[in-house]
Image (spheres, rainbow, N blue to C red):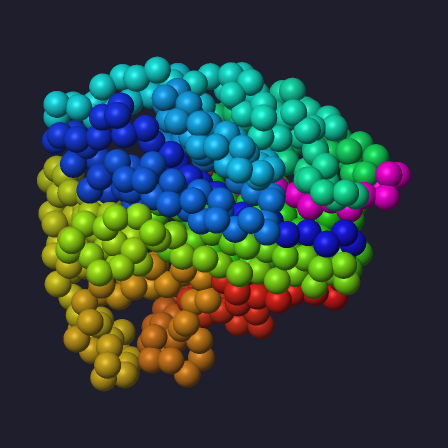
Amino acid sequence: MTPLKFYLLTDTHYFEESLGAEGKAYEEYMKTEAFYLKESSAINKAVFQKLKDDKETEIIIIPGDLSKDGEFESHKSLIKELNDLKDSGKKIFVLTAGHDFNEHGRSYKNDEFVPVKGTEFKELYNLYYEFGYKEALSVDEETLSYIAEIAPKTRILALNCDSRRECKGLIDERLLTWSKEQLDKAKEDGASVIAMCHYPIIPSVPVFDLVGDAHVKNWREVASFLADNGVELVLTGHMHIQSINEFVTEKGNKLYDICTATTVGTPAKYRKIEITEDGTMDVKSINVDGFSLPSEFHSAEEFFDWRFKYAIKNKINKILEGGSGIVKLLKQLGSKVLNSIKLKTLARLLFIKIDSSLKNVKLIDFAGDLATAIFKGDMPYIKGTPEYDAISKALKRLSFILKKLEPKLSKNGVNINLTDMLLNTIGNNKGYSDNNAVINLKG
Ligand SMILES: [Fe+2]
Ligand SMILES: [Fe+2]
């Protein structure tokens, strides 16, 4: 294997601030948005500066959701930044995704949503020509997937599963056939191939297997296809989560999927990855910081966490708003319970004992902390922690419901065990970190 060193960042969701990000409509929208919008250009510029400062690492890989929502001016400003990085000696390979094309872009001015020029999917090839397509050995014109040499004898297969609204996350037979031709050609030429794809191929945490939009639709097929054709590593985004996962095919081949967070929302990380000649991959995660913070926050981490928790709470409460008659009453009751109930009450209702440290924690705060921990990776609630203990007792108590659900959720010959799935989602039991890991690709 040729030694390879690169930066991986994703879901920059770049928004050109001069389009407008202010007023009542903006404030209302931001109540349920988990990542920053107005501040996104300043945050991303701080990351780009750090990349520029590292003179040792040339390659930068960005697997999609480059702009907030396809505003043409956001693309133009981001491309200006990418050109600047290129001029400083970087080689940049991007993939576009669902948030990069949109005929109806919008900004936020004078308390209203204001339409702005969007971007059509077919425009993305020319816009990002300098950042992948120019170097491409082959381009699949329908999806704008491509394969390019990123280093001697090393290619990147950029698989676009997010080029059509009607089948988001699908890598169809036609695209697999094109990919097979590219992988066969690489083999013939003695080149190794790493892949990038916007959607995670392997679900980032076990429960995401049950969430349709959280992974490539036909993920087992695609993971097997890649691994059985010599691809050992895929770089992904979309879920704004830090995770590293492996999948072993029936033939015994292994694929690693490194999914990385957005740069503009918690956990706000990017990665530096180094692969040595013997196949040892060293993954390091770096915090996004170095931009000016509002005075009420002491650290970038606090700033990003605040937005995530605020948006999650508002989202849950929004779901519980409205309705009429009995639905309204039930929603009001649900909202009251969620916002006021403490874990000790819930434990009493379920006839389980929980650790005293959890008793006075509100259910809504507990849910917020669990969600934040899951998206940060290295989920800490493993066996022996009060949280694991409480959740495993609750799941045992509710097992009669879970057992009824499991057959309905199991498909394609894969049996679902909800208890294992949930416990492996709140605790990382994989044997390596989601953030900083040393992995032997040939292992
Ligand atoms: Fe995204
Ligand atoms: Fe996405």
Residue 162 percent across, percent down from the top left: 53, 31
Residue 21 image offset from top left, x and y in percent: 22, 30
Residue shown at the point (33%, 21%) measured from the top left = 105
Q: Nearer the viewer, residue 315 or 190?
A: 190
Res. 178 image quadrant: top right
Residue at image point 38% right, 34% down = 14
Total numbered badges shown on the rendered structure? 0
The location of residue 311, given as percent across then percent down, is: 24, 48
Q: Quadrant of the C terminus?
A: bottom right
Residue at x 23%, y 84% (from the top left corner): 356
Q: Tell me the quadrant of the picture where the N terminus can be found.
A: bottom right
Residue 303 sits inside the magenta stretch = no
Q: Is residue 193 magenta?
A: yes
Residue 337: x, y in percent?
15, 60
- Magenta span of residues: 187-201
- Establish if 243 lies above or below 84: below
The answer to whether 150 appears left or right of 184 in the picture is left
Q: Is residue 182 left or right of residue 66?
A: right
Residue at image location 70% in from the left, 34% down from the top: 148
| 428 is higher (above) or lower (below) than 81 | below
- Could you tell whether 13 is left or right of 17 in the image? right
| Residue closer to the observer: 171 or 433 | 433
Let me know if residue 190 appears in the view: yes
In this rendering, does residue 247 appear at all?
no
* Image quarter of residue 280: bottom right
